Image (cartoon, rainbow, N blue to C red):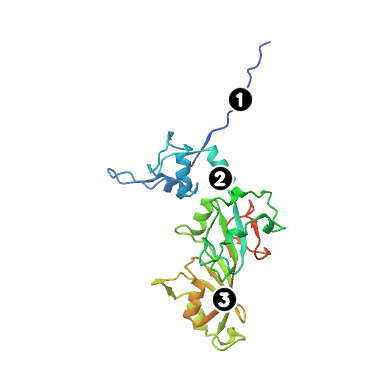
Amino acid sequence: MQESPKPKAVTPPASRAVRIPKPAPSLPGSPVPTVRLNKRMADLGLCSRREGDDWIARGWVRVNGVPAVMGQPVALDARIEVAREAEQQQRQQVTILINKPVGYVSGQAEDGHQPAVVLVQPQNRWSECNSRMRWGHEQLRGLAPAGRLDIDSIGLLVLTQDGRVARQLIGEGSDIEKEYLVRVSYGAEALNVQAVFPREKLALLCHGLSLDGQALRPAQVSWQNPEQLRFVLREGKKRQIRRMCEQVGLFVTGLKRVRIGRVNLGHLPIGQWRYLAPHEQF
């Protein structure tokens, strides 16, 4: 009896090819548009530009089947392949949510104030964080804030090693909503600011103000209670809410960020942190 041929072993691919969106057709005879490879990789959502440069330097990127070189210009329809090592490295990167207290700065230490990242220690991990991720000191390497929260404010701050997350939250053209609860006072009135604050000024907070010579994008601003406003912004200029309030005669006495995109602060205690869960998306 003739033996059946043995099935061939299937070798997993060593790299992942990226499906490239079809570019708009160019005019006959016109030069083919190109862009730097690291920018193209960032535009495709593969990584940040800096991360792309690191992958290229390590030999983890191929363009149209050829190993990539640093600074290489590529056509918009170029086939980009990323080695499995890059994907494995990316899966190990962490994104951390922290409830920043007053007195800590978002980024580098300044004027004697510590950055919020110093709180990212195992003893400050929220007991209800259900991530299976284990804490390790390597998670502090390259961990940086994706957005600001000023020293006098509290609430949700995102720290990440993942360039894709940073690009989504603070990259050019980012459209992610940020929600804040803002306690205010108005003139000599200590109680029921809502009752005495002019409606036309509330309308100005929603749309019509400018900062640093630029018109602000429309915002959602509404009363939560007689002394507290809810702001939803799609931009993040320095001390934006405090400066907006100053323009209409309000003084901010407390500011708390409670949401970024679809991720909420929830019951995360002040000064504690948790990992962004795999199912959570901004």
Q: Nearer the viewer, residue 5 or 255?
A: 255
From this viewpoint, which residue is outermost toward the bottom? 188
From this viewpoint, which residue is outermost toward the front? 112
Residue under label 3: 222
Question: What residue do we see at 43% from left, 35% from top?
Answer: 67
Location of residue 141 in the rendering, given as x and y in whole percent from the top left corner = 55, 50
Location of residue 201 in the rendering, given as x and y in whole percent from the top left corner = 49, 82
Task: Decide: is 29 above or below 98.
Answer: above
The answer to whether the residue labelled 3 contacts the one labelled 2, judged by CB atoms less than 8 Å apart, is: no
Q: Nearer the viewer, residue 88 or 33?
A: 88
For the residue labelled by badge 1, is the local secondary structure a helix, a strand or a loop?
loop
Residue under label 2: 90
Q: In the image, 97: left or right of 212?
A: right
Q: Earlier in the sequence, mark 3 or mark 2?
A: 2
Q: In the image, 66: left or right of 100?
A: left
Residue under label 1: 9
Give amino acid for label 1: Ala
- Mark 1 vs mark 2: in front: 2
The answer to whether the residue labelled 3 contacts the one labelled 1, judged by CB atoms less than 8 Å apart, is: no
Quadrant of the drawing holding the N terminus = top right
Location of residue 162 in the rendering, given as x and y in whole percent from the top left corner = 54, 51
Q: Residues within 10 Å of mark 2 (few under 14, many from 20)?
A: some
